[in-house]
Amino acid sequence: MNRDVIIACDFPSAAETMAFLDKFQEEKPFVKIGMELFYAEGPQIVREIKARGHKIFLDLKLHDIPNTVKKAMHSLSALNVDIVNLHAAGTIEMMKAAREGFAGCGHVPLIIAVTQLTSTSEERMQKELLISAGINETIVHYAKNAKEAGLDGVVCSPLEAGMVKGACGKEFVTVTPGVRFAGGDAGDQVRITTPAKAREIGTDYIVVGRPITAAPDPVEAYRRCVREFVG
Ligand code: C5P
């Protein structure tokens, strides 16, 4: 297992992102680039962060018709990132198409599917999305669909990582946002836990944004995460 902490670099510009990364003189954290930064700066931001030696999770959560997802993944393949993702709700056919987008590429990233966003509660899922199953059942079902489509793993809450591995196998990767230090501010996240508990449950990667980026000392907050999660 490659247990690691991924920092969600949710910044509005390249300048702020680089100023943040400059604080890390002794380590090269695994970095997540999401929609905020990618839409502001385009693919060049990926190249720049990669050139600094960081591993990259490109979190664009694709969700479209299979042909469009396949072509979009093919475009992203030129960026040589380490993890990409898409929504499992787009169907097994769409997830298979995502993998086809990397056919013939020398380097294929881990391709993972979002099950249910960690900001979604069971109540909202049932009331607003009309999914009548429970949230755990839905997450495990979506994870099995992702496995059937040939994907490498899923994004879920650390609280669900054990269940997912139980259903899909130990090697099936879990990448888990929704992480807060004990007593920390949850913000808009709902299904949350601490780095130490995430380690106990056995997830592979935790994705941590505001508890590190908004901390008075981000490097110390990152190191605390690594201590608690990686050990
Ligand atoms: O600041 P915070 O730690 O809540 O950041 C979590 C990050 O993980 C955000 O960038 C968010 O977009 C992402 N994410 C998530 N839930 C998912 C998938 C991705 O919170 N299911």
Image (tube, helix red, strand yellow):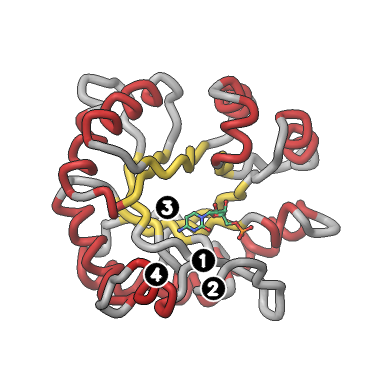
Residue at mark 1: C-beta within 8 A of ligand 1: yes
Residue drawn at point x = 25 percent, y = 37 percent: 65
> What residue is pinned by disc 3?
2
Residue type, label 3: Asn
Element carrying mark 3: loop
> What residue is pinned by disc 4?
128
Q: Quadrant of ligand 1?
A: bottom right
Element carrying mark 1: loop
Looking at the image, residue 1 sits to the left or right of residue 217; the answer is: left
Looking at the image, residue 76 sits to the left or right of residue 140; the answer is: right
Picture quarter containing residue 9? Answer: top right
Q: Quadrant of the C terminus?
A: bottom right
Which circle's residue, 4 or 3, is located before the other in the chain?
3
Residue most toward the right?
Answer: 216
Disc 4 to disc 3, C-alpha distance: 36 Å
Residue type, label 1: Ser
Q: Which marked residue is nearer to the observer: mark 4 or mark 1?
A: 4
Residue type, label 2: Val
Which circle's residue, 4 or 1, is located before the other in the chain?
1
Element carrying mark 4: helix
> What residue is pinned by disc 1?
119
x, y percent for residue 230: 54, 62
Residue type, label 4: Glu
Q: Which marked residue is nearer to the observer: mark 4 or mark 3?
A: 4
Which circle's residue, 3 or 2, is located before the other in the chain?
3
Residue drawn at point x = 64 percent, y = 30 percent: 40
Picture quarter containing residue 73? Answer: top left
Residue drawn at point x = 74 percent, y = 32 percent: 18
Mark number displayed over residue 190: 2
Q: Quadrant of the N terminus?
A: bottom left
* Contact check, label 1 and label 2, Cβ < 8 Å: yes
